[in-house]
Image (cartoon, grey):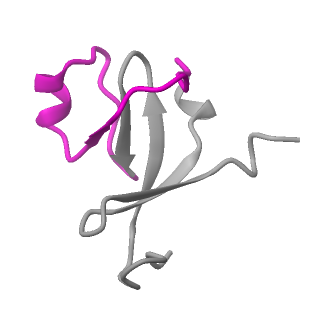
Amino acid sequence: MLCPKCGKEMKNGFLCGRGYNYFLPEGEKAPKFLSNIILGKKPSVILAPDDFSTPFCHNWPKAFWCGDCKILLADYSELME
């Protein structure tokens, strides 16, 4: 997917949450325990906290991240009826 702001290719991944909200690139395994140190060792992007949190990986929405513009797009189409 192309970034709507700069037009560059965005990284594919997932919007994840379990006490922390973060973007995890596709192909990366989610850590069993979460902390800033553990997430900092992965190519993840820690996001501001909000009400979204789900403990199971299969429920995480697909997401796209533009590191240049700091834009995250999350696709909820498969999660909503």
Q: Is residue 63 left or right of residue 9?
A: right
Q: Position of residue 68 (x, y in %)?
A: 24, 69
Identify which residue is drawn at 68% across, 47% down: 76
Q: Is residue 22 above or below residue 56?
A: below
What residue is drawn where x is 26% and y is 63%? 67
Q: Residue at 36% of width from left, 82% of height from top?
A: 6
Q: Does 46 sit above or below residue 3?
A: above
The answer to whether residue 2 is above or below residue 15 is below
Q: Is residue 67 magenta?
A: no
Task: Please state the total of marks drawn on the protein image.
Answer: 0
Give the x, y percent position of residue 20. 35, 23
Which residue shows up at 20% across the image and 18% down it? 35
Q: Quadrant of the C terminus?
A: top right
Q: Which residues are magenta?
A: 26-55
Q: Main secondary structure of the magenta part?
A: loop
Image position of 79 (left or right of 58): right
